Image (spheres, rainbow, N blue to C red):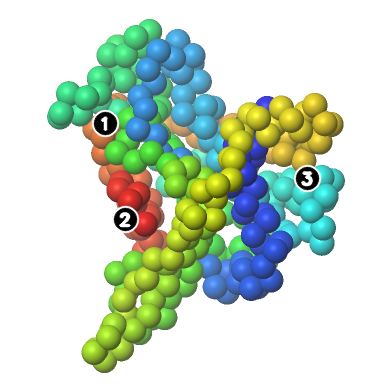
Amino acid sequence: MDHFPGMDFIQNILATRFYNPLIEGIWNNQFISNVQISLPEKLSIGSRGSYYDENGVLFDMFQNHLLQILSLVAMELPDELTTDKIHTNKLDALKNVPTFKEEEVGQKVVRGQYQADSEGKYNSYRSEEDIPRDSQTSTYVAAELKVDTPRWEGVPFYLRTGKALIEDYTAIDILFKSTESIDADVATRLTFMAEPPKGLSLVINQKMPNNQYEPISTFLGPDTTTFEDKYIAHPYENMLQDALAGIRTYFPTFEEIKEQWRITDSIVAGWEKQTKPHFPNYRANTFGPYEAEALLDKNNHVWVKRPNLEKE
């Protein structure tokens, strides 16, 4: 069971496309510059050391949660939201994510391990309970993937997650192409926030008053009043209810899981051919390794950052 597809606001990705032809009409490489799927966590590994050091961030978060979310973003929209059609299209999306070649892992995947922060809030990963003092386990990963379909040709998908970071949320940012003649401070984007807060938000540009067409970024949403009187079920509630009712829509199929492991295993194989990383390589309570910034910088993209969610 992967509880992330059980989140109402992750399911909202597919629903919003289905309900709004306007959104689906721009859900392609003609309008979208890049897609960012972010699951940063403020939590360190806590008391999970023996489990975590054996698996690391790649198996804990990437192979399952991040790739399941990617499949919902990248899949072709079915003509109706039935279980079989959703699974078929999710599987097709995953099949079109190429296996990483050995040299691509070094170019398109960043791994990291946290060290103690300067404020004394976090221990170093290697000082955590049940962690070897020379551990090479990754607590952070960022990767650039592509989906080889006409819809997504030329659009990079950036996935990231990590422990002991300054940010703590689950978000899918769809960043749109901009007019080259304007220099806006914030990229135009549609965001699906799963937690916290929850719901859609949109950043668009309009004209600055009393100015010769200087753009000003406008933030719309998330509309918290829409859901303030609604009970938002825990994702495990949704998944258990569906299991009891025999509804398998948001339970990954075996074929989907095979594709997720194919992608993940190709990263592991690439790491095994590389020299040992210089860990630790990022300080806790920061945004993560510098190399994660460079991963996007080479494509003239930047990560969406929201350490203070109250601003959006």
Q: Earlier in the sequence, mark 2 or mark 1?
A: 1
Q: Secondary structure at mark 1?
A: loop
Q: Splitting the image into 4 quarters, where does residue 155 fall? A: bottom right
In this orientation, does residue 67 appear? no
The residue type indicated by label 1 comes to Ala
Disc assigned to residue 87: 3
Residue at the (69%, 51%) spot, across then down:
93
In front of the other: 145 or 201: 201
Q: CA distance from mark 2 to mark 1?
A: 23 Å
Q: CA distance from mark 2 to mark 3?
A: 36 Å
Q: Are marks 3 and 1 in contact (CB under 8 Å)?
A: no
Looking at the rendered image, the quarter that the C terminus falls into is: bottom left
Q: CA distance from mark 3 to mark 1?
A: 38 Å
Q: Splitting the image into 4 quarters, where does residue 259 fall? A: top right
Q: Position of residue 280 (x, y in %)?
A: 28, 27
Q: Position of residue 138 (x, y in %)?
A: 40, 27
The residue that label 2 is drawn on is 311
Q: Secondary structure at mark 3?
A: helix
The residue type indicated by label 2 comes to Lys
Residue at the (47%, 72%) spot, across then down:
177
The residue type indicated by label 3 comes to His
Q: Secondary structure at mark 2?
A: helix
The residue that label 1 is drawn on is 284
297 with respect to 223 (left or right) = left
Looking at the rendered image, the quarter that the N terminus falls into is: top right
